[in-house]
Image: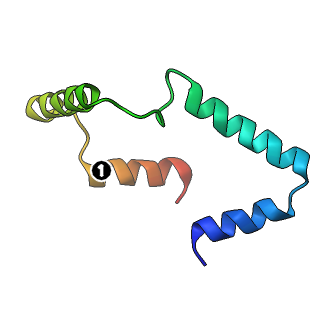
Amino acid sequence: MTLREETKNMIDFLPESDVKAIYGLIKNLYEKESSPFRPLTKKQILADLAESRDEIESGAYTDFDIAINEIEKAYGL
């Protein structure tokens, strides 16, 4: 069963008031100006890529494997 199907099955068992509260929360997440889920313009995407390239060139980043190890340690995974 897919994650989507599992999620739908869980929602089917919740009372309608809980489902409305969940949908309200999700709607608020997407509508906030600072939401990471908002669609980006082409200009924003290119600016983010340029910033990323600059950080890589200057060494201002954490290697992926090191970052994952730090996350695992922090959360006991």
Q: Which corner quadrant holds the N terminus? A: bottom right
User: Residue at image x 64%, y 70%?
Assistant: 5
**Of residues 75 and 34, the one drawn nearer to the viewer in this rendering:** 34
Looking at this view, name the residue that lies furthest to the bottom. Answer: 1
User: Residue at image x 55%, y 50%?
Assistant: 75
Question: Horizontal and vertical percent for residue 35?
Answer: 51, 29
Numbered label tally = 1
The amino acid pointed to by label 1 is Ile
Q: Quadrant of residue 24?
A: top right
Looking at this view, name the residue that lies furthest to the left. Answer: 57
Question: Horizontal and vertical percent for residue 6?
Answer: 67, 69
Query: Colour mode?
Result: rainbow
Question: Horizontal and vertical percent for residue 34?
Answer: 49, 23
Question: Horizontal and vertical percent for residue 62?
Answer: 26, 41
Above or below — where is 41 with respect to 63? above
User: Residue at image x 28%, y 26%?
Assistant: 44
> Quick check: 63 left or right of 54?
right
Q: Which residue is mark 1?
A: 66
Query: Which secondary structure lies at badge 1?
Result: helix
User: Residue at image x 28%, y 55%?
Assistant: 65
> Quick check: 9 left or right of 53?
right
Question: Label 1: few (<14), some or many (≥20) within 10 Å?
Answer: few
**Of residues 64 and 33, the one drawn nearer to the viewer in this rendering:** 33
Looking at this view, name the residue that lies furthest to the top. Answer: 33
